[in-house]
Image (cartoon, helix red, strand yellow):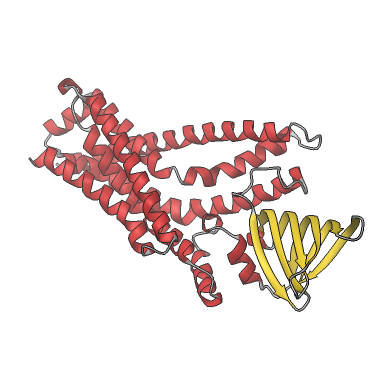
Amino acid sequence: MSMLINTLGRYFAGRFLISALGVFASIFVLLVLVDYIEMVRRTSSLASASAIMVAETSLFRVPQLLEKLTPFCVLIGAMTCYLALSRRLELVVARAAGVSAWQFISPALASALLLGVFATAVYNPVSAELREQSKKMEAELFGRDPGGGLQDATGFWVSQTTSEGNAIINAARSEQQGKRLTGLTVFLFDPSYQFKERIDAGEATLENGYWLFKSVRRYSLDAPAVNQDSFRLATNLTPVQVQNSFSTPETVSFWQLPTYIRSSENSGVASAGYRLQYQKLVAQPFLLIAMVMLAAAVSLRFFRFGGVQKMVLSGVGAGFLLYVLSKVTEDLSKAELMHPIAAAWLPVCVGGLTGFLALLYQEDG
């Protein structure tokens, strides 16, 4: 009997992995095509934009977008797997052989746990690095045009005050966690907060004690615009402060998040976003387990009993409600109205308990 269960376990685990990875690959290809079409539209007026470079930029952007959809890939993959097994009556044969539902979903649970560990420890750092590469390519494609590329929200803002006065810096794109900026607009004020001049620049890098701007155009109230190859602006910002200001939690590798959390807390910058992202990545393997349990709860019904379509729709609806819950808790945590641990683990607990209780009711009465 144990040999039978081990053989079936390997078979069910293989079927689940094939279904989950198939859904993942399909969504990946779809996202690449959609992103590539959007990038082609934005670069259609740029003579220097080659099709290969545009394709590489889209290809490097997509892994981080797809990372957010990993739980749904597992949910759809598990539902597809169990519905196919049920349609081919393989679940009927397994039950007739004395294998309970808990025994043939255990391989999928173990596989989901391993997928979650891989996604957190390996896939997340790789996607963060590829996202940085895509930002470099976007800067090469669009140059100093602040409206080009697929920007991060409305750009990045930082303010600094030195003995020379106050400066407000806006950058369309950030690279190397804020150490290199492109598409810049800078507003300079004197120590009495009177406007001095505006500076537009193609790029800027943070050096030791100053910002180095390149491809500069300076505007002042009492003089015509002046073009300069470079311009230095003194700053008292440290690399740590710049990283915390210009980097978003999603672009920081899982292995670097503890360092960012400590540096944010030491510099007095809000660290709720980094702590939430860290807890979400830690909880990701268990979230995938919860998704498998939800999928099993709505996919183990035999086809001859009917009502399969309603069960599938209920599974998709449960996944959507779980996503809404995760977004609500995420917003509450970023507003510091909920602890990051509670915000990250509440959807896991709700999804896991819902699937477990549904399976318990169906299988054990």
Place of residue 184 in the rendered image (x, y in percent of width and height, measured from the top left)? 74, 55
Q: Quadrant of residue 162?
A: bottom right
Q: Residue at x 42, y 34 (%)?
A: 23
Whether residue 208 is visible? no
Q: In the displayed structure, does residue 138 sit left or right of residue 337?
A: right
Above or below — where is 281 with respect to 233? Answer: above
Asked which quadrant contains residue 43, the reply is top right
Q: Position of residue 5 (x, y in %)?
A: 20, 41
Q: Taking 136 as reference, is 307 left or right?
A: left
Quick one: 343 or 168, which is closer to the camera? 168
Q: Residue 147's x, y, as percent?
A: 71, 44
Residue that appears at 32% across and 37% down? 78
Q: Is residue 267 visible?
A: yes
**Position of 208 compared to 224: left or right?**
left
Quadrant, the C terminus: top left
Numbered label tally: 0
Quarter of the image with the N terminus is top left
Residue at the far bottom in the pictured view: 163
Of residues 352 and 343, the one nearer the viewer is 343
| Residue 152, percent from left and from top | 61, 49
- Residue positioned most to the left: 365
> Which residue is nearer to you in this view: 31 or 111?
31
Q: Residue at x 63, y 33 (%)?
A: 38
Depth check, front residue: 288 or 272: 272
